[in-house]
Image (cartoon, helix red, strand yellow):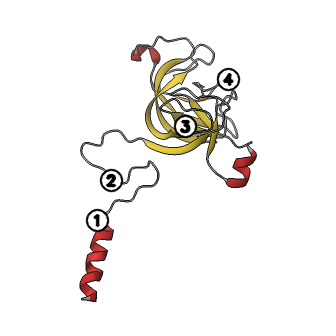
Amino acid sequence: MTKLFLAILLTLGMAAPVFADGIKQVVSPTDINPQWMVTAFNDTGSTVTSRSVVSWDDDDTDFSVSLLPYFTTVTTADDPYIAGVTLTDCLDQQLCDIQVYGPAVVRVADATDNTAVDTLVSTSSVAGQAGDYGPAANTCALGTYIIDATALGSGGAADNTLGRVFINISCQ
C-alpha cells in the first residue's frame, strides 16, 4: 500500500509544470510568442506608460535593504541597470509586469537618439524611451531593433514612436 501511494505521489509530482514567475517552462505548438515577464515594483514617483523602457532602481534604500525588484525610468543613455519594458500602464507604487526577454513593441526616441533597424538599442536621454546603443564599459543594451516605427505605422524620426525590439539584455 505504501509503495502504491508513493508511486501515485511521484506521478502527480512529475506531471505538474513548474513556473518561475513569467518564464515559460512548457512549450506547445500554439505557444509562438516567447515573452519572459518579471513582476516588479514601480518606484518612479509617477505612472509609467505602457511600452516604456525601465531600469532597476539601484539607488533606492528599500532596494538595497530588501533586494525587492524596484524599477524606475532613467535619462541615462545605455544604463547598466536596464530591466526591460512595461507592457501596460503601471501606476506609481504598484506591482507590475515588465518584459525581460522576447519580441516587444517599445517606445523609441528616434529624433533625439537616432536608431536604425538591426542595431542594438538601450535606454536614451529621454525617460522611458529606447535609443541607439553606444557600446562602452559598464553599459547594457536592451536588445535588437527589428522593426522601425514607420513600418508599424506610428510615424518615424520622432520621439515617442513605437518600434519592435527583440529584448535580450546584454552588458559589457
Q: Is residue 87 above or below residue 100?
A: above
| Mark 4 / mark 2, whichever is N-terminal | 2
Q: Amino acid at mark 2?
A: Val
| Mark 1 / mark 2, whichever is N-terminal | 1
Pointer 2: what residue? 26
Pointer 3: what residue? 84
Residue at the bottom extreme, as displayed: 1
Q: Badge 1: how crowded within 10 Å, few (<14), some, or many (20+)?
A: few
Query: Tag 1's secondary structure?
Result: helix
Pointer 1: what residue? 15
Q: Badge 4: how crowded within 10 Å, few (<14), some, or many (20+)?
A: some
| Picture residue at 39% right of the left edge, 50% below the top | 24
How far, Cα to Cα, is label 3 from label 1?
A: 32 Å
Query: Tag 2's secondary structure?
Result: loop
Query: Tag 4's secondary structure?
Result: loop
Tell me whether the residue at label 3 lies in contact with that at label 1, contact meaning CB atoms closer than 8 angstroms.
Answer: no
The picture places residue 163, in percent across and down from the top left corner, at: 47, 22
How far, Cα to Cα, is label 1 from label 4?
A: 48 Å
Query: Tag 3's secondary structure?
Result: strand
Q: Amino acid at mark 3?
A: Gly
Q: Amino acid at mark 1?
A: Ala
In-front residue for pair 126/90: 90
